[in-house]
């Protein structure tokens, strides 16, 4: 071939490559997350890992064709949640090299890693894409303090760069009914750099509700982008999956790439790409088994600003969410027409522990619990007799099945009838709200995670609301308002995790409810 043609072909290839990859000068990058229903071959680690690795590689290839820079997969997506007892974990787990080893499983063989790590490393290399997975890790132990099996097992994230090299490994800090796994003596704070100028932090599922490592990344390290594998168990009325992911991203004003484990019958579903105060790029919450690759162009956050801000959520990227909600509704209708109308299994907060007032019409009311007060101004224009609502306020400690934690919350929540026990229902309602205004003050705000919490019957957040925050000394004043006529409301409020030691000792789960919840979660996992 003529040398001139060779040069032309090389130039064309390089031009395509430069177009394909985001750079530090790009104003955005292309991200993908996968809502994924893992394949489980009973009592067969090799077959389970192989089947899910095959599926992952297909998604990596599909994302590569779309010029994606980074793709994220869910927690437990390779092994499934059906892990055996600890003594049988060897075949389900892999050695994971540290980032300092500069190890590329695809091309090196000096460390004995699993076939899964090798194949995904090769897929990342072939597609020139950053890949984030979650997998069970094993680490041989020879110290005096080792367990009898001389092995540590961790719930770990692994990050591969465009060459297939492992550039980050994170071990989950806050376990949620995971008896097989250990935790590190000191919580890990893991950050990785990319060639498109964005530094990412990473954590896993339940970590999102805790100070370490999540808020250490966003507040101490000023990280603006997070990759987040999860297998979330949704809880109404404040902590369903997309509701929580969107609220956390908004509260911390960071981009969040959340990939969810899909098993709706056991309560696991919910993935999305969230843009901090700019709204939601794409999100999905499926009521039936569903697999989907979500791709979105994510604007880079150049500089974080915190506090003393007004935010009109109606001006955000939520037009893309509206488009995705339309697809969401069409998918649900198609499945209903085919006779497949499963429901998502939900956990429920104990609303008996809240101070609540029935909402019987328009009202202005200040409600307090343990010194924490929320002021409500609610205008109701139409009442649907088939659904009820309550104003609800909580301040104290509650139990997340295995952990007691400080919480402050206030909101308008849906109930299916007049009883408090019915609150946390998620149904369509013709009750029309002309406006809702909620204000609250949070003290020692640097030790508080504050999230807007909104929900509709399709388990996606509301659009068209406003949010104000103003700092005075050690406290922050938060106002949320919904000023357009809105029906089909499930939740509208503020949910906060209080990490200070001064939070009240009141517990929202009594001991009987605690054991019922614990047994339920164990049954769901096994």
Image (cartoon, grey):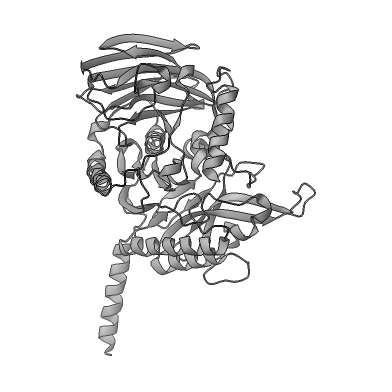
Between 309 and 402, the residue placed more toward the observer is: 402
Task: Give residue 277's position: percent from left, percent from top.
Answer: 33, 35
3 over 396 or under it: above or below: below
Seen in the image, is 96 located left or right of residue 62?
right
Which residue is most to the right?
144
Q: Position of residue 280 (x, y in %)?
A: 31, 40
> At which x and y percent is residue 93?
60, 57
> Relative to residue 136, is residue 230 drawn left or right?
left
Quarter in which the N terminus is drawn: bottom left
Residue at 59% across / 33% down in the picture? 402
- Please give the name of the residue rendered at 48% of the width and 46% of the height, measured from the top-left corner: 201
Q: Which residue occupies the extreme front position in the image?
A: 339
Q: How many marks?
A: 0
- Residue 270 visible in rendering: yes
Of 458 and 184, nearer the camera is 458
**Residue 404 figure quarter:** top right
Residue 209 % position (x, y): 50, 34
| Above-or-below relation of 430 to 522 | above
- Return the residue nearer the eye: 425 or 4: 425
Q: Evaluate whether residue 301 shows in this view.
A: no
Q: Residue 11 sits in which quadrant?
A: bottom left
């Amino acid at each position: 071939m003529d040398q001139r043609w060779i040069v032309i072909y090389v130039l064309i290839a390089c031009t395509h490559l430069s177009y394909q990859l985001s750079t530090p000068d790009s104003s955005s990058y292309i991200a993908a997350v996968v809502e994924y229903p893992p394949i489980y071959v009973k009592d067969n680690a090799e077959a389970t890992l192989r089947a899910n690795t095959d599926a992952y590689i297909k998604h990596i290839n599909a994302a590569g064709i779309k010029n994606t820079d980074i793709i994220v997969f869910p927690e437990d997506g390779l092994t499934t949640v059906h892990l055996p007892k600890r003594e049988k974990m060897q075949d389900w787990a892999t050695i994971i090299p540290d980032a300092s080893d500069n190890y590329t499983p695809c091309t090196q063989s000096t460390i004995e890693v699993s076939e899964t790590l090798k194949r995904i490393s090769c897929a990342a290399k072939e597609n020139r894409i950053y890949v984030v997975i979650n997998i069970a890790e094993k680490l041989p132990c020879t110290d005096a303090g080792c367990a009898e099996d001389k092995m540590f097992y961790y719930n770990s994230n692994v990050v591969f760069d465009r060459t297939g090299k492992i550039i980050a490994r994170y071990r989950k800090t806050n376990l949620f009914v995971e008896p097989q796994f250990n935790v590190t003596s000191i919580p890990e704070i893991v950050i990785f750099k990319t060639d498109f100028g964005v530094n990412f932090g990473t954590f896993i599922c339940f970590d999102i509700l805790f100070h370490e490592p999540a808020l250490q990344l966003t507040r101490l390290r000023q990280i603006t982008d997070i990759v987040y594998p999860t297998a979330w168990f949704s809880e109404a009325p404040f902590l369903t999956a997309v509701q929580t992911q969107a609220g956390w991203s908004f509260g911390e004003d960071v981009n969040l790439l959340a990939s969810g484990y899909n098993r709706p019958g056991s309560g696991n579903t919910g993935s999305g790409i969230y843009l901090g105060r700019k709204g939601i790029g794409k999100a999905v919450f499926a009521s039936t088994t569903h697999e989907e690759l979500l791709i979105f162009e994510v604007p880079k956050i150049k500089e974080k600003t915190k506090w003393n801000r007004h935010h009109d959520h109606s001006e955000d990227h939520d037009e893309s969410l509206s488009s995705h909600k339309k697809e969401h509704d069409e998918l649900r209708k198609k499945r209903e027409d085919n006779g497949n109308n499963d429901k998502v299994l939900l956990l429920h907060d104990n609303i008996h522990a809240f101070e609540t007032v029935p909402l019987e019409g328009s009202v202005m009311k200040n409600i307090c619990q343990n010194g924490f007060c929320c002021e409500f101004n609610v205008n109701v224009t139409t009442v649907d007799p088939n659904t009820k609502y309550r104003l609800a306020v909580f301040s104290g400690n509650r139990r997340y099945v295995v952990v007691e934690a400080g919480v402050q919350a206030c909101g308008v929540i849906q109930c299916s009838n007049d009883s408090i026990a019915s609150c946390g229902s998620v149904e369509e309602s013709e009750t029309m709200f002309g406006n809702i205004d909620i204000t609250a003050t949070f003290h020692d705000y640097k030790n508080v995670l504050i999230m807007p919490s909104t929900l509709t019957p399709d388990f996606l957040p509301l659009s068209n609301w406003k949010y104000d925050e103003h700092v005075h000394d050690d406290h922050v004043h938060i106002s949320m308002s919904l000023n357009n006529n809105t029906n089909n409301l499930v939740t509208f409020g503020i949910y906060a995790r209080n990490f200070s030691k001064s939070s009240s000792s009141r517990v929202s789960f009594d001991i009987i409810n605690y054991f019922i919840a614990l047994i339920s979660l164990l049954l769901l996992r096994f």
